[in-house]
Image (cartoon, rainbow, N blue to C red):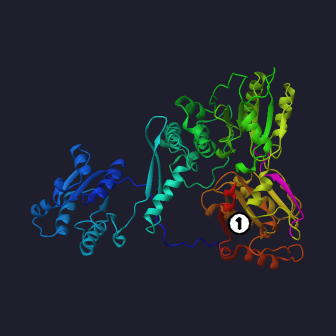
């Protein structure tokens, strides 16, 4: 039986809460701030204060005059209900005002005139508790069921209206000023059109849901398991395969594909592309036929090579993702020579941001069920643009000839009169493990390595290499099929799915996601526990790769470079226990982020 992560106390359950009715006690500037937040959440707001409107700050008085909220005089309540105490009159008021789902006590601010005493605060808090109404009491954390995050609400730059996107930061009461600073730092690093991108994705989701609703109303079981369409889904398998699109596609298959494509677009497309989506483009996208923007017609761009009858085609590798790993040749092509960039979806925003704004950028629509058609579309677009004298860059992640289909494109372009220049890139197969602190070869541990794919043409299962103690196995594009990969590697006896000996269940494994990027995630485990670890370690971050072999432990901590000297199952199990350390009982460990020294680049 697998153990589960041990809860670490001190955190908060962060929710996006939309209370039906909010009661605010006090009427100062902080109460006005709380009222505005509640109003923006479409909550009915009632302000309770001694003296009523005459005691309210200017903002609250103005909002009352505009009909945005109600202000109730607490003194009048005492007379109305004939109760001598604030708590008694509040009790009667709550009886007469059903539906209040949130309370904020703001007249407890440190240093304020007439600050409510601890005793009164506790009495009010207990009253709200009895009625199961969550309450926040300012500057008295012992009387708080929740705290507020430092929040930023974004605007949709395409419409000038508010965006659905909000960002909140909390230090769980350990530093409100610090939370505000961190929130500002986070917001400053986001592109200006991020609010518009959230709005457009919301509209795209609504269209996809509308197309699936008739089937959901019929309770079609085939739609189960495609929760990507739901808001804030914690689904951990964003690359789960779906059936390929075909001429005989059923209504159910079409609905599943549309829902999957929304998740894929949200995951891979640059924010600038998402923010510019139009309604017709959304509809065409869900139908699998989104029109691209017209390619530029001029052939005298400042970024062009000397004009000629034909343009030039470059097949370029962008490396694993970190912009500093671009080669000088790739940087030159992107920033000085390109008229058109036809990019694969895995190339990150940080690389695309280097391309001058005058250069047309298209993103490949290689979503599940559409990869072959999208590949053909990009090659045809490249030939069309080159025939008009434009310089075309086919931008691929990693190295274009390492599972980048560069060979197919070379032959395609050559058959149409173009000899493309292939510019190598840093392969994620080598850079990913390095960023994870794993050497693919290491004297005493791994004498060789082999790179393979986790999926064959048209989704077919492939034959994986057998176990060799001194060899590192690198599997690209295999995370979505992890269960069948592990089965192929470990099942006993001869099998057509593996060429050679079976891997021991305790063989170390590392899944490296978003290699070289600030949000890189490394899941370390064994073949025995890696599937469970992936399911229970939180949200996945594609793209990911799988590393199998003893190289995974070679440089961890004090290191272990004696693997080829000392063997045996018992000794190997001890190695794994030392490697996983405190996480050995669970069977897996997660590490996020990259070495901060990469910030120097």
Residue 340 picture location, percent across and down: 71, 31
The residue furthest top is 309
Residue at x 63% of width, y 61% of height: 535
Specify the segment rendered in magenta: 445-459
* Snapshot quadrant of residue 286: top right
Residue 288 picture location, percent across and down: 63, 33
SS for tag 1? Answer: strand
* Snapshot quadrant of residue 357: top right
Answer above or below: position of 413 versus 449: above
Residue 510 picture location, percent across and down: 74, 63
Residue 457 shown in magenta:
yes
For label 1, the residue is 524
Give the quadrant of the C terminus: bottom right
* Snapshot quadrant of residue 312: top right
Residue 258 picture location, percent across and down: 59, 39
Mark 1 residue crowding within 10 angstroms, few (<14) / some (14–19) / many (20+): many
Residue at x 25% of width, y 75% of height: 119
Residue 583 shown in magenta:
no
Q: Is residue 33 left or right of residue 158?
A: left
Q: Is residue 191 left or right of residue 1?
A: left
- Residue 440, can we see it? yes
Q: Is residue 152 left or right of residue 20?
A: right
């Amino acid at each position: 039986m697998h153990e589960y992560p041990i809860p670490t106390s001190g955190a908060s359950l962060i929710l996006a809460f939309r209370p039906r009715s909010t009661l605010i006690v006090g009427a100062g500037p902080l109460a006005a701030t709380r009222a505005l937040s509640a109003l923006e959440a479409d909550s009915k707001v009632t302000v309770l204060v001694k003296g009523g409107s005459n005691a309210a700050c200017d903002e609250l008085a103005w909002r009352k005059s505009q009909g945005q909220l109600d202000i109730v005089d607490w003194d009048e309540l005492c007379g109305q209900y004939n109760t001598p105490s604030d708590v008694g009159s509040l009790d009667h008021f709550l009886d007469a005002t059903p539906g209040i789902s949130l309370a904020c006590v703001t007249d407890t601010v440190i240093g304020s005139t007439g600050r409510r005493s601890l005793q009164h605060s506790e009495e009010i808090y207990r009253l709200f508790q009895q009625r199961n109404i969550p309450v926040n009491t300012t500057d008295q954390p012992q009387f708080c069921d929740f705290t507020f995050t430092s929040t930023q609400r974004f605007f949709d730059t395409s419409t000038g209206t508010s965006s659905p996107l909000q960002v909140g930061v909390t230090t769980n009461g350990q530093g409100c000023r610090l939370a505000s600073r961190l929130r500002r730092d986070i917001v400053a690093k986001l592109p200006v059109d991020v609010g518009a991108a959230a709005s457009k994705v919301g509209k795209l989701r609504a269209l996809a849901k509308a197309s699936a609703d008739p089937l959901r109303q019929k309770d079609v079981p085939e739609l189960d398991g495609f929760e990507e369409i739901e808001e804030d889904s914690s689904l951990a398998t964003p690359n789960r395969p779906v059936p390929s699109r075909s001429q005989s596609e059923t209504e159910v298959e079409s609905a599943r594909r549309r829902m999957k494509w929304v998740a894929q677009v949200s995951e891979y497309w640059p924010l600038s592309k998402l923010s510019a989506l139009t309604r017709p483009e959304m509809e065409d996208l869900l139908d699998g036929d989104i029109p691209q923007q017209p390619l530029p017609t001029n052939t005298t761009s400042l970024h062009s090579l000397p004009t000629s009858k034909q343009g030039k085609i470059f097949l370029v590798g962008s490396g694993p993702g970190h912009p500093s790993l671009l080669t000088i040749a790739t940087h030159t092509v992107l920033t000085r020579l390109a008229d058109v960039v036809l990019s694969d979806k895995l190339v990150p925003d940080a690389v695309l941001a280097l391309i001058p704004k005058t250069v047309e950028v298209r993103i490949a629509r290689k979503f599940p069920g559409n990869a072959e058609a999208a590949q053909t579309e990009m090659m045809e677009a490249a030939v069309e643009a080159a025939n008009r004298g434009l310089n075309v860059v086919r931008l691929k992640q990693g190295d274009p000839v390492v599972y980048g289909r560069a060979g197919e494109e070379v032959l395609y372009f050559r058959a149409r009169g173009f000899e493309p220049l292939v510019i190598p890139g840093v392969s994620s197969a080598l850079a990913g493990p390095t960023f994870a602190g794993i050497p693919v070869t290491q004297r005493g541990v791994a004498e060789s390595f082999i790179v393979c794919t986790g999926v064959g043409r048209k989704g077919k299962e492939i034959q994986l290499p057998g176990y060799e103690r001194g060899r590192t196995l690198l599997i690209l594009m295999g995370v979505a099929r992890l269960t069948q990969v592990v089965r192929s590697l470990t099942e006993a006896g001869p099998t057509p799915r593996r060429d050679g000996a079976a891997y021991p269940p305790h063989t170390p494994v590392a899944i490296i996601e978003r290699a070289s990027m600030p949000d890189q995630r490394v899941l370390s485990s064994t073949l025995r526990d890696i599937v469970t670890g992936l399911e229970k370690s939180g949200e996945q971050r594609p793209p990911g790769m799988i590393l199998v072999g003893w190289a995974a432990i070679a440089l961890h901590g004090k290191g272990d470079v004696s693997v080829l000297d000392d063997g045996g199952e018992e000794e190997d199990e001890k190695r794994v226990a030392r490697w996983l350390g405190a996480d050995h009982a669970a069977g897996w460990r997660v590490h996020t982020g990259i070495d901060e020294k990469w910030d120097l680049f």
